[in-house]
C-alpha cells in the first residue's frame, strides 16, 4: 500500500479560501504522480475521521488517525469507501504489537519507564 496523502482533509477544512475544486485537483494530481512513477498498488489516505471529506481520494482507502469509536469509523469509511473494508486505523504501529512487554525506555529510573503492554492498555490498543 502507498499512502497518497497525509491529513489533507484537515488542511482543506482550515483553508476555506481555497475552493473544493482546487483541493480535488491537487489530490488527483498526487494520485496521478504516484501511478506515473510506476506504483500499481492500493492507496490510502490518512486523516482524522471528521476530515475524511476534504482528504478523500476516489479509489483510496480512507484511513483514520486514532479513531477510538468503531461505530464512527465504520460510518465514515462506509460513506467514503462504498461499504468496502477493511476499517483501517493507520496510527496503530506494527512495532508496538511486536514489542509488547519490552521497556520503552533504557532509562535506569524504572519509575519513569513503562512497558508497551502498559502503554497499549492505557490507550485501549489491546
Image: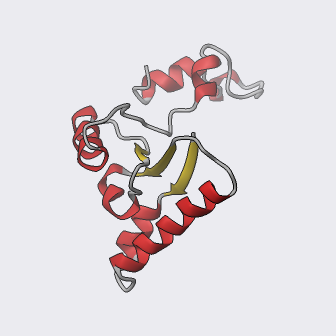
Q: Quadrant of the N terminus?
A: top right
Q: Quadrant of the C terminus?
A: top left
Q: Residue at x 56, y 62 (%)?
A: 32
In the figure, 2 relative to 58: above or below? above
| Residue 103 place in picture, x, y as percent | 68, 20
Q: Residue at x 52, y 41 (%)?
A: 42
| Residue 39 place in picture, x, y as percent | 64, 47
In the figure, 58 relative to 114: above or below? below
71 relative to 51 in the view: left or right = left
57 relative to 5 in the view: left or right = left
Between residues 32 and 22, which one lies in front from this camera angle?
A: 32
Between residues 55 and 106, which one lies in front from this camera angle?
A: 55
Q: Residue 125, located in which quarter of the rendered image? A: top left
Q: Residue at x 54, y 54 (%)?
A: 4
| Residue 90 place in picture, x, y as percent | 49, 39
In the figure, 119 relative to 32: above or below? above
| Residue 3 place in picture, x, y as percent | 56, 48
Scheme by which the image is coloured: secondary structure
Amino acid at each position: 500500500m502507498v499512502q497518497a496523502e497525509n491529513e489533507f482533509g484537515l488542511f482543506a477544512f482550515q483553508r476555506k479560501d481555497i475552493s473544493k475544486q482546487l483541493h480535488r485537483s491537487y489530490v488527483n494530481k498526487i494520485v496521478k504522480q504516484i501511478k506515473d512513477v510506476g506504483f500499481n498498488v492500493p492507496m490510502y489516505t490518512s486523516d482524522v475521521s471528521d476530515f475524511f471529506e476534504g482528504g478523500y481520494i476516489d479509489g483510496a482507502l480512507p484511513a483514520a488517525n486514532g479513531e477510538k469509536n468503531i461505530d464512527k469509523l465504520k460510518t465514515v469509511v462506509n460513506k467514503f469507501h462504498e461499504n468496502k473494508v477493511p476499517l483501517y486505523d493507520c496510527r496503530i504501529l506494527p512495532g508496538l504489537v511486536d514489542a509488547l512487554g519490552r521497556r520503552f525506555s533504557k532509562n535506569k529510573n524504572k519509575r519513569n519507564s513503562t512497558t508497551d503492554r502498559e502503554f497499549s492498555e492505557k490507550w485501549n490498543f489491546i
